Image (cartoon, rainbow, N blue to C red):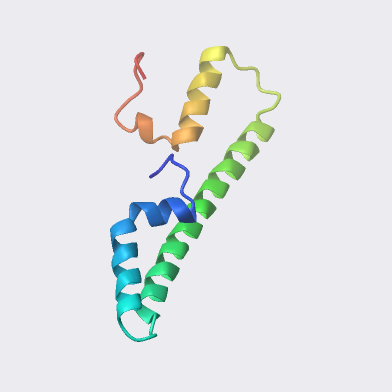
Amino acid sequence: MSNTSVTLSAAIMVRRNAYYDHLESAQKSSLDITSWLLWFLGTLKEALEQALLRIDRVLMKATFWQRHATTVLNERQIKVLIRLLDTAGEEFEQDINARK
């Protein structure tokens, strides 16, 4: 899920089987929804953590471009920098080549 948009609804969709299991269990048992709430809050926490990571990445990219606003770069350099910043360098872990 690194580059995909992870919202709460998307996080629930990824875990929809567990969501329905917890929901069904809560509906069939007593009025105790503790298990479902714990699952939901865990899913919410993960979605929020992913959102914070995306925000951090956006701020890092903005800071980089502000610092280098006056740096003269050609089109290819800009393209590589954009890809590095968008993937946090993960795409180039093995190497940089003409194809990448």
Number of numbered discs: 0
x and y percent of residue 98 in the render?
Answer: 36, 13
Where residue 95 appears, as percent x and y from the top left, is 32, 26
Q: Which residue sits at x=28%, y=67%? A: 21
Side (left or right) of 70 relative to 17: right
Q: Quadrant of residue 100?
A: top left
Foreground: 51 or 19?
19
Placement of 73 over or under 84, stated as above or below: above
Q: In which quarter of the view is residue 29 placed?
A: bottom left
Taking depth in this image into account, of 44 and 51 the one nearest to the observer is 44
Residue for point 52% across, 52% down: 51
Residue lying at the far right of the rendered structure: 70
Residue 83 or residue 43, whichever sits in front: 43
- Is residue 80 depicted above or below 37 in this figure? above
Location of residue 30 with respect to 20 vertically, above or below: below
- 16 to the left or right of 77: left
Residue drawn at 33 percent across, 57 percent down: 15
Horizontal side of residue 49 vs 68, given as left or right:
left
Q: Residue 49: where, in percent of width, then height?
A: 48, 58
x and y percentages locating residue 1 in the rendered image: 38, 45
Answer with left or right where residue 60 lies relative to residue 89: right
